[in-house]
Image (cartoon, helix red, strand yellow):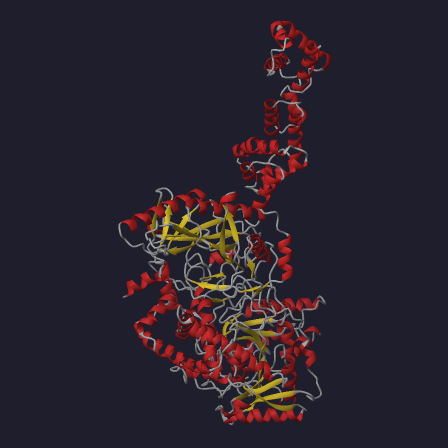
Amino acid sequence: MRKPRTPVIGLEIHVQMKTESKLFCACSTDYIGAVPNTNVCPVCLGLPGALPVVNRKAVEYAVRTALALGARIGLSTRFHRKNYFYPDLPKAYQISQYDVPLAEGGRLPVGEEEKRKWIPITRLHLEEDAGKLVHSARDGRLGNSEYSLVDYNRGGVPLMEIVTEPELSTPSEARDFVSRLRQLVRFLGVSDGDMEKGSLRVDANVSLTDPQGGLGTKVEIKNMNSLRSLERALEFEIARQEECLERGEPIRQETRHWDDGKGLTRGIRGKEEAHDYRYFPDPDLPPLVLSEAFVEEQRRLLPELPWDLKERFVLQLGLSSEDASTLTELPGIARYFEGCVREGASPNRAANWIRTEVMRFLNEKKTSIENFPLSPEKLSRLLARIDKGQLSTTLAKTVFERMVTENLDEDEALEKAGAIAGKVSGDNLREMVKKVLEKEGPTVEEIKSGRDSKGKKRSFLCGLVMRESKGQADPAEVAKVLEDILDR
Amino acid sequence: MNAAEMAKAVREAKISAVEIAEGAIGRIRLIDSDVRALLTPLFERALEKAEEIDRKIELKQDPGPLAGVPVIVKDNLCMRGQVTTCGSRMLENWRPPYDASVVRFLEEAGAVILGKANMDEFAMGSSTENSAFFPTANPWDLERVPGGSSGGSAAAVACGYVPLALGSDTGGSIRQPAAFCGVYGLKPTYGLVSRFGLVAFASSLDQVGPFARSVEDLALAMNVLSKPDPADATSSWTTRPDYAAFLGRENLKGMKVGLVSEFEDYPVQSEITEALARVESILREAGAEFVPVSLPTTIEAGLPCYYILAPAEASSNLARYDGVRYGLSAEAESLMDLYMKTRGLGFGPEVKRRILTGTYVLSSGYYDAYYLVAQKARIRISREFRSAFEGADMILMPTTPTLPFRKGEHQDDPIQMYLSDVFTLPVNLAGLPGLSLNAGYSKSGLPVGVQFVGPKWGEGTLLAAAEAVERVLGKPTCAFGGEKA
Amino acid sequence: MPIGKDEILRIANLARLFVSEEEIGPLQRHLNGILEHFERLKELDLEGIDPFAFECDTAGSSRQDAVSVWPGREDVLAQAPNREGDFFRVPRILDESDEVHLDECR
């Protein structure tokens, strides 16, 4: 029986870890913007005689990530050498892990609630990053360059490679997976997960099942540096393979580059299968042996995982699934939100304000929550005023605006906004209400004769009083005074 | 004077470090044009260092246990700012920007490094004929080889330039030249001495060790060299003993010395068999007890196992010489061209042979059949040694099957040359300590060496036994002692 | 099965090692000699041996995540065969694949 062709997608993700120093030497990992070849030493330059010593923190980070994914940690694993010549690889081999990776198994959820699907992880291992090449051609393309320049600042930065089983079936699932993984590494604090900066790099394997449901030929796609380009590249590649097969052409097993500008994938000349990496255990590095106690310590250090946190926000705090998702996207935002709730803010109001006002500010200023000027405590105090009816939402937003842009404290901001709630109150307010009622005789009569069952007319009067007070009365008090006078 | 006596005299201000250095330099200038042990003399630097030592003495500071002792180090040990060639065109002008840990240990202990010793290119060879620059001669017979790959270091000690020299031993490269040149050579337990700054040949087999003309000096050198090094992940954290404490034993009562039954049939030159017998009787006399031990497959399996594993590691270790960052770099039109030409021009024939062998045995489809089988054989050899040491404290065996051979004798048949290491390389495969000592001279005046092999961390036993032999046979004499100097 | 000339060229290419026509024959003989020697190993009983079971008392050794700046950078760049400013320079990269080069050779 002919079945429709289904895409089969697997991902290979390289995550750069946020350690201070490189995987095998004491050079800084902070290479972005650094003068070329400054974060270098005999070890990461591959000078004769230099030897690698593994960075404990990188192992901890990788173990924590593996534990968060529910993977099995290998208590005794090895480093291998992957041998090939390229100028960005100073020893002409990359130290990586091969037959026995640091962790195997595990899974990561994609999709929401009832549509949630757990994507199995094949393995997670440690390896070192390569240096960077700058090609001389104006367009920066290798093919047009007379020569290339090498910078080893990135060489030796710790990476973890995470490989999934080929169980993703749509481009959006793949996108969701990467986004979840990014969220996870950010929550764990092991990587900044920034695809644009290259701290999270995704290669994808795509094939289409044949009409009998059997596996098709796998094509590897590289060079996708955003979630969007990952999704687009996969969509393009699936369509391309479908068309090929429709035309009766076989799929070539190859590596293709995604061209984001042109929106297409292109086969690269070199044949990947031609490589013979001659893997063998690195004799400079003893086995990576971890104790049960070490692993347990790392487990203890795991924060609440983002998907658990989200569930808790929905179930315990009554947030909508959408709000909860947004708030758990970044660990800083989630912590900020929890801070507000701890300070007594109502979860829904806090969620709403963070999603709108706070995030708008962060976007406009292109900054992160860590640099946000209002502490959760201050925001909570402001929100409490709304809850108590001391401030209208509109006024509160003005006050918020002044607090964050002019760096004012709450009282100063309230004053500048001319919005000290309750400034018109007590006897003054009573006088003001009486004056308004005198002008609105017919409406008062209608209310008194019981023709305001829906309370619209009372609201109308309230509004008039508020306008009269130039917003400096407390709406709740206005309502109470109005009630008092009318009911007499 | 041996190193211990020199250091004592310098520390007691009976002689200055500069006087000692000048004496050594004079001897090198007199003799080395024939022997050619030195690749790079560092005389000026040495005299400056010696002055520093003397200043310390004047200021009543302690320059360390090797105060003013002149030493020569093999040219595969990095010295900051000093040409370090590894005997290769590839690194002809390379000046390392850092010191090997052992070089630092030596200088911190007050040693004065006089120069860099000649060696087989990248330590691959058993005759020092594979040096890209010139061969070194055997100080006892200039027509013969000094052994290798640390031939320059061994010859320097044999000629009496210096009381101590450093070599490296991957399959016998300290012990075989020590035997050929008639001096002591100690290859320590793997992990005892730091490899940081030793230009790698085969990382799982390489160890740095000393050459000397007295057992006391070997112990002194080991006390300086064997320190845990955080820069070398394979450097053991085991607490090191005071090696001098193993010396001065009245007798060897209670020591069990193993003789390998399987080695009896192996063809060894008669002078060596006689030397073994001589040493056996000395040790017996000193109270040691002899027991037969068995290493059933070691001699059969060792050579093929080694000549798979060492080239495999070497092929990867030497891949970094690509003309991009340092060293030789050929004129080239393209990157591939740069790689092929640089490596084609920069490496000599023996290095090429080993790189190709190593690349082959690791390549797809051959890894399991060669590399993995050899690795299993290696484990088996280790286990054979381990069981042998259950009944013995050390083993007495030949260092080499022959006396020093003539220059050019094995140049057409590399595998014949490999056989020179048949008794030394299993010791590296098992990661054990081995000490080669002089046990007399042949009728033609060539030195004859024998080897002590110990269990892991068994250096002390080897030193104690060597001292017992030294008491009877005397310390090795300097070559050319009565001729030129 | 002895190693032929093509195989020598394939390995030399993998090792990025130019070998001249005259070198091929001796290299072939040498490699075949080594492998012939190796045949002895195959007669050994190696059943059940874990090839990586060697004792290792440094297992698990690691370093702390602390940065230190290495002062020798200029010494390295000054010796670079082909330096351009702060960079190491390499000639035109035609193709990274092993096979393509071999095709050119044949």
Q: Position of residue B16 (x, y in %)?
A: 65, 73
Residue A143 drawn at (x, y percent): 33, 51
User: Does any portion of residue A71 appear in the rendered image?
Assistant: yes
How many discs mark residues in the rendered view? 0
Nearest the camera: B115 or B288?
A: B288
Task: Tell which of C18 and B45 is nearer to you.
Answer: C18
Front-most of residues B34 and A362: A362
Position in image of residue B255 (x %, y %)? 67, 87
Give above or below for B44 relative to A431.
below
Residue sitting at x 49%, y 54%: A120
Percent across and percent down for residue B120 are 46, 75
Q: Is residue B479 above or below residue A388?
A: below
Residue B155 seen from this side:
no
Q: Is residue C28 left or right of residue A323?
A: left
Which quadrant of the view contains residue B17?
Answer: bottom right
On the rendered image, what quadrant is the C terminus of chain A found in?
top right
